[in-house]
Image (tube, grey):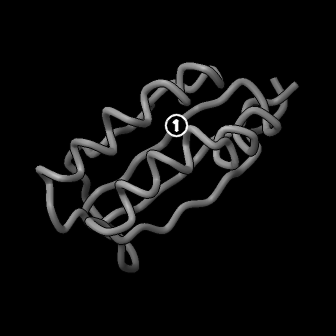
C-alpha cells in the first residue's frame, strides 16, 4: 500500500500564536502515524512562487492522511492555525513501494 503525504505551503503571520497550533497538532499526527519529512526548513524557490514555509508530512496510507485531516482533533488544531496563517495544502498518494 503506498504511503501518502500532506504537502503544505504556509505563510505564518504570527509565529508565537502559530506555536499553539504546532502543539495541538501533535496528538492527531501521532494517532494517524504521521511523520514530518520537511518542516519549515530553509528553501530555495527555483521556479514559480511559493509561500515562505514548506511542510511535507508522511502518512502510512492515503486513508490515514485523509482521516487525520478530517478528524475532530486535527480540525481543533486547525482552528488555532487559521487566524494566524495562510496555507495551501494538498493530500497526495505516493508511488507504490
Residue 24 falls left or right of residue 32:
left
Residue 66 falls left or right of residue 55:
right
Q: Which residue, as the protein is rendered here, is positioned at the far bottom?
A: 48
What residue do we see at 38% from left, 35% from top?
Answer: 24
Residue 24 falls left or right of residue 93:
left
Classify 53 as above or below 57: below
Classify 69 as above or below 37: below
Q: Which residue, as the protein is rendered here, is positioned at the far right?
A: 1
Residue highlighted by disc 1? 57
The local crowd at label 1, few if under 14, some if 14 to 19, many if 20 or more residues have their Cα within 10 Å, is: some
Q: Position of residue 22 (x, y in %)?
A: 32, 38
Q: Position of residue 81 (x, y in %)?
A: 36, 57
Q: Position of residue 20 (x, y in %)?
A: 26, 42
Q: Position of residue 9 (x, y in %)?
A: 41, 62
User: In which quadrant is the C terminus drawn?
Assistant: top right
User: In which quadrant is the N terminus drawn?
Assistant: top right
User: Which image quarter: residue 72?
Assistant: top right
Residue nearest the observer in this picture, 50 or 45 = 50
What residue do we see at 46% from left, 53% from top?
Answer: 78
Assign a secondary structure to mark 1: strand
Residue 6 falls left or right of residue 9:
right
User: Which image quarter: residue 3?
Assistant: top right
Residue nearest the observer in this picture, 90 or 70 = 70
Residue nearest the observer in this picture, 6 or 73 = 73
Residue nearest the observer in this picture, 30 or 54 = 30
User: Which image quarter: residue 53?
Assistant: bottom left
Amino acid at each position: 500500500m503506498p504511503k501518502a503525504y500532506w504537502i503544505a505551503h504556509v505563510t505564518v503571520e504570527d509565529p508565537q500564536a502559530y506555536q499553539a497550533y504546532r502543539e495541538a497538532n501533535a496528538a492527531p499526527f501521532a494517532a494517524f502515524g504521521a511523520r514530518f519529512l520537511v518542516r519549515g526548513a530553509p528553501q530555495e524557490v527555483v521556479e514559480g512562487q511559493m509561500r515562505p514555509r514548506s511542510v511535507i508530512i508522511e502518512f502510512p496510507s492515503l486513508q490515514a492522511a485523509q482521516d487525520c485531516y478530517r478528524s475532530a482533533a486535527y480540525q481543533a488544531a486547525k482552528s488555532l492555525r487559521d487566524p494566524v496563517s495562510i496555507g495551501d495544502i494538498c493530500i497526495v498518494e505516493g508511488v507504490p513501494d
